[in-house]
């Protein structure tokens, strides 16, 4: 079966005029404030958009800051010290990052996730961790978040369709979770499974893909410091359209690898079958590393359109993270293992 991705050259991209005027902020004492605020919203995530106080802000932080120190997240500006994993490129404004999304569980149109995200209930929510681990368990999402200090990561995100964003995630390293579960010597891969519930995900009432959505990484990829579990976006609780309450962010791979609304993490000995590689194996490989030298069968991957920009820019190998991750694939034919 060949799946057509939704209009990779569409012209209805959100523009800067659509960006809401949000309060500027930076991340301050993130875990305590984030968890306290997240606990207040046990219903739908439809209300978690514009107008909310940024969830990681310490009370009075704006008044304490020097003028202009925080920048304007609504307009894509971040003025805080960059971490070792951050890109310095302008952040995609929140309104654009939350209104132009691929999330087939809601529908195949870019506007479907934001329009239908109110159907997703993110509390209660549990994540099952099993397979080749010494400490298998099912854990509540709030307990899971409390295990780790939350970190900022400003990552590039490159969609296989030829567009890109810069996303400021809030979350924790995937490696920290895996090590806590103590993998056995047989563990070679990490498989992720998303929620399968057509009542909450209207897109699952169609057979456009085989549900539930499944993705996977090699264990060494999952343990890389850049592999990240996100629970927030731009200092807010992660919106439903962006994968609430827990999603993967793997910035050197095409966006479809970064599975959303995760309910299960399984360590396996054998390479798992993943959703897009089942649906269209001639178009979507297991590794899905961003590679401008390997075209998609139906379009070039040499350039991309950054959301909010009119012109196209060159796509970088591994989405600009080659220095950090190229060693994972030493000796591999990246045209064969796409």
Image (cartoon, rainbow, N blue to C red):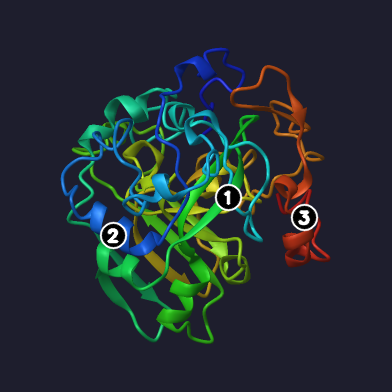
Q: Nearer the viewer, mark 3 or mark 1?
A: 1
Numbered disc 3: secondary structure: helix
Q: Nearer the viewer, residue 283 or 122?
A: 122
Q: Nearer the viewer, residue 164 or 106?
A: 164
Q: Nearer the viewer, mark 3 or mark 2?
A: 2
Residue at x-position 48% and y-position 27%: 96
Label 1 and label 2: CA atoms lie apart by: 22 Å
Q: Position of residue 310 (x, y in %)?
A: 67, 17
Residue 167 can be seen in this image: yes
Other residues around mark 1 within 10 Å, as few (<14) / some (14–19) / many (≥20): few
Q: Is residue 125 above or below residue 210?
A: below
Numbered disc 2: secondary structure: helix
Label 3 and label 1: CA atoms lie apart by: 25 Å
Other residues around mark 2 within 10 Å, as few (<14) / some (14–19) / many (≥20): some
Q: Which residue is mark 3?
A: 322
Tag 3–tag 1 contact (CB < 8 Å): no
Numbered disc 1: secondary structure: loop
Q: Nearer the viewer, residue 290 or 238?
A: 238
Residue at x-position 31% and y-position 41%: 53
Residue at x-position 25% and y-position 52%: 37
Label located before the other in sequence (3 or 2): 2
Q: Which residue is mark 1?
A: 80
Q: Which residue is mark 2?
A: 35
Label 3 and label 2: CA atoms lie apart by: 34 Å
Residue at x-position 57% and y-position 36%: 77
């Amino acid at each position: 079966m060949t799946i057509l991705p939704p209009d990779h050259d569409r012209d209805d991209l959100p523009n800067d005029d659509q960006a809401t005027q949000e309060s500027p902020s930076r991340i301050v004492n993130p875990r305590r404030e984030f968890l306290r605020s997240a606990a207040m919203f046990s219903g739908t995530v439809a209300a978690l958009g514009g107008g909310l106080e940024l969830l990681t802000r310490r009370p009075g932080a704006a008044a304490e800051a020097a003028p202009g120190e925080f920048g304007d997240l609504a307009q894509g500006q971040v003025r805080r010290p960059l971490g070792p994993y951050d890109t310095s490129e302008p952040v995609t404004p929140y309104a654009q990052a939350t209104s132009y999304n691929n999330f087939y569980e809601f529908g195949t149109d870019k506007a479907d996730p934001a329009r239908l995200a109110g159907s997703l209930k993110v509390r209660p929510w549990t994540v099952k961790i099993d397979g080749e681990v010494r400490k298998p368990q099912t854990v509540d999402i709030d307990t899971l978040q409390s295990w780790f200090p939350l970190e900022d990561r400003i990552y590039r995100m490159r969609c296989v369709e030829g567009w890109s964003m810069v996303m400021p995630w809030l979350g924790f390293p995937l490696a920290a979770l895996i090590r806590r579960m103590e993998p056995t010597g047989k563990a070679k891969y990490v498989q992720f499974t998303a929620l399968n519930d057509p009542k909450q995900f209207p897109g699952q009432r169609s057979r456009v893909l085989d549900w539930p959505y499944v993705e996977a990484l090699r264990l060494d990829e999952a343990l890389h410091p850049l592999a990240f579990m996100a629970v927030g976006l731009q200092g807010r609780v992660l919106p439903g359209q962006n994968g609430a309450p827990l999603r993967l962010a793997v910035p050197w791979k095409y966006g479809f690898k970064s599975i959303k609304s995760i309910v299960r993490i399984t360590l396996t000995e054998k390479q798992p079958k993943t959703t897009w590689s089942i649906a269209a194996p001639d178009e979507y490989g297991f590794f899905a590393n961003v590679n401008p030298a390997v075209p998609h069968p139906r379009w070039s991957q040499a350039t991309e359109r950054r959301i909010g920009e009119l012109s196209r820019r060159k796509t970088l190998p591994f989405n600009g993270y080659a220095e950090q991750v190229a060693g994972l694939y030493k000796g591999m034919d990246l045209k064969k293992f796409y």
